[in-house]
Amino acid sequence: MKKLNREFYNRDSIAVAKELLGKVLVYESGGQKVSVKIVETEAYMGIGDKAAHSYGGRRTPRVEVMYGNPGFAYIFLIYGIHSCFNIVTNEAGNPQAVLVRAAEPLEGIERMSQNRFGKSCEQLTKSQRKGLTNGPGKLCGALSIDRSVNGEDLCGNQLYLEEGEGEDFTIVTTKRVGIDYAEEARDYPWRFYIKDNEYVSVL
């Protein structure tokens, strides 16, 4: 499948977040390849978005990658434990990003199972199988994505995105999750997911 190019990411986060649905996230490491279909995203619109790490022009070593060119990985930790995979969007200096919240496993499911639960895919319960990648921290755990790939060029050959199969689906638009601190921004309808996909994190 064709890789997404820099121009795909060089737009505002809302547009990119919607169009990332159905695209394929691929991670090649240690001679192994895993891939997932993106089914849920959230847009973070940068300096004017109270939910964004770059709100108000905040610029720290942690968020510096967001101020760079589009199409790079921004990885942050929640609760100091779980990694979250974000994609830097828009032109350099406009620190926007898209959080990939959930995905559907495609390739390398056995490795994802070992990474998440320490057992083979055959040994997983129905709940565990569904729980492989149905949340931002779970997704990164399954794919072994962590801060070591923060700043990775998504137009490269290790961590990248592909076009996907181009199937038809309905996009649900709703407010973002877990940002009650963000005042009015918590109600912005900037979360998008594929309707009826079982790997969506929150309905």
Image (cartoon, rainbow, N blue to C red):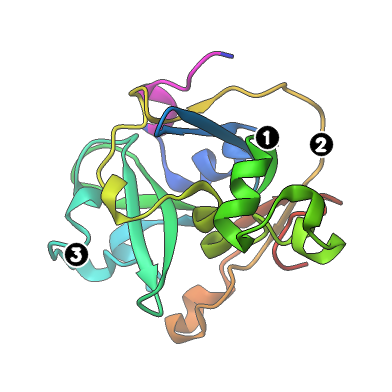
- Earlier residue among tags 2 and 1: 1
Query: Dot 2 corresponds to which residue?
Result: 169
- Earlier residue among tags 2 and 3: 3
State the residue at coordinates (86%, 51%): 196
SS state under label 3 = helix
SS state under label 2 = loop
Residue 155 pos. (x, y %): 35, 24
Is 86 on the left-hand or right-hand side of 113? left
Quarter of the rendering containing residue 70: top left
Which region shows up in magenta? Answer: 2-9
Instruction: Kindly tell me whether residue 70 is visible in this rendering.
Output: yes
Q: Are marks 2 and 1 in contact (CB under 8 Å)?
A: yes
Residue 37 vertical placement versus 203 (above, below): above
Kindly identify the amino acid type of the residue bearing the numbered disc 1: Gly
Residue 129 pos. (x, y %): 77, 56
Query: Dot 1 corresponds to which residue?
Result: 22
Query: Dot 3 corresponds to which residue?
Result: 57
Kindly identify the amino acid type of the residue bearing the numbered disc 2: Phe
The quadrant the C terminus occupies is bottom right
Mark 1 burial class by Cα count in 10 Å: few <14, some 14-19, many 20+: many
Mark 2 burial class by Cα count in 10 Å: few <14, some 14-19, many 20+: few
Q: Are marks 2 and 3 in contact (CB under 8 Å)?
A: no
Residue 51 vertical placement versus 102 (above, below): below
Q: Is residue 34 magenta-colored?
A: no
SS state under label 1 = loop
